[in-house]
Image: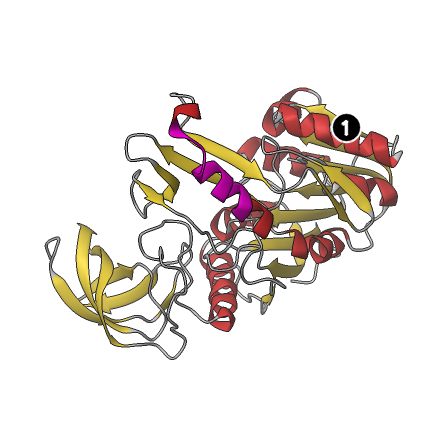
Amino acid sequence: MSADQSLEVEVERILPGGLGLAHVEGKTVFVSLAAPGDRVRVKIDRSQGDLLFASIEEIVTPSPVRIEPPCPYFGRCGGCDFQQLTYEAQLAAKAEMIRDCLHRIARLENVPEIAVTPSPREWRYRMRAMWQIDRDKRAIGYYERGSRRVCDVADCAVLQPELQEKLEQVRATDWREFPPELKHLDVVAGASLTVRGEVYQYNAEAFFQINPSLLEPLIDFALADASGETALDLYCGVGLFTLPLARQFKKVVGVESNSAAVRFARRNLQRAGLANARVIHAGVAEWFRSDSARQVDFVLLDPPRAGAESAVIKGIVDLQPAEISYVSCDPATLARDLRKLISAGYLINSIVAFDLFPQTHHVETVVRLSQGRHGSV
């Protein structure tokens, strides 16, 4: 089948990555911006053997869970790809994505039901963003879907009101004031946030979760009643988990590669009076190769979307902590790393997901593991 050819297909379900799955004439079709149960006419954008990648030309019969996307930029802007789904359908799709990855990649035979904690805010939740800038076209917004063209966005419906105001201020700025080399702006709402009684300072250069409304239950589940002598917080950022870990363990070591985040993490610990925790400025894999701890009771890791490096998983296994808490924003790389941990004798105790990214296919998942004799899955 050639590019630009049209086909009528029925979308079976949503796959990890957010694409709809369909089959036709012995071929597998991946449909962007689909809803499970859609009957659609699609255009083949490209093919790869028996795999076809397609976009919707016409909705023949809409899915019962399909709604009209409220954002005028939907379909062109690459930011949100789930606005066509009811919120309940978004949560169900994310749970199924996690289950799919755990079964297919981690090779878990009996995957437990996944509960996805909904966001209190389905819109206007995002406290940080990156705005792309095109001086030639005088456009400010986000990349268009599947391209490096900038979609000019005047109102982003997932930004917190404070960030939306910043966007409007930036858009009102005279173009002569923009430095010629400026290609994008990293922005964040506020300079500090209080979660579970802990005060965190941060800026746009230091990673911090984008949806503050779910941070309290996220931390509650990731740490639960963990306690002991020593805890390790890998990819610790500005100390979101480091501070509460320092309340529950006698000694905590955080490891973070971003220099701005390290400065904030150390400052946040100092302000909280938590002298039993320290943050090391190093890449996590590099730290394991050189100066890792030798005795740890509990390890928490919150790696970027690419997951943990192989050296990091090996380092954790070599430490043999009694418990591990893995916080992930990508079900596929999470499943890849879980497979390695399970092969090393760890068992999954519990899994909970948090919808930190409404209107998108992204989801935050937390998995609690323990050494084999204590595990339950």
Residue at 42% over, 61% down? 82
Q: Nearer the viewer, residue 368 or 194?
A: 194
Of 7 and 25, which appears nearest the observer? 7
Q: Give whichever of 173, 45 is nearer the camera.
A: 173
| Residue 168 visible | yes
- Whether the magenta-drawn stretch holds residue 172 is answered as yes
Q: Is residue 35 left or right of residue 334?
A: left
Q: Residue 186's spot in the image, x, y percent?
A: 52, 34
Q: What residue sits 50% from the left and 62% below the top?
A: 94
Q: Which residue is mark 1?
A: 266
Mostly what secondary structure, the magenta segment? helix
Q: Position of residue 306 (x, y in %)?
A: 49, 40
Tell me if residue 225 comes above or below residue 41 in the rendering. Answer: above
Q: Amino acid at mark 1?
A: Arg
Q: Which x, y percent locates residue 37?
A: 34, 75
Highlighted range, magenta: 164-175
57 sits left or right of 247 in the view: left
The secondary structure type at the circle numbered 1 is: helix
Q: Is residue 200 left or right of residue 35?
A: right
Indicate the quadrant containing the C terminus: top left, top right, bottom left or bottom right.
bottom right
Above or below residue 2? Residue 146 is above
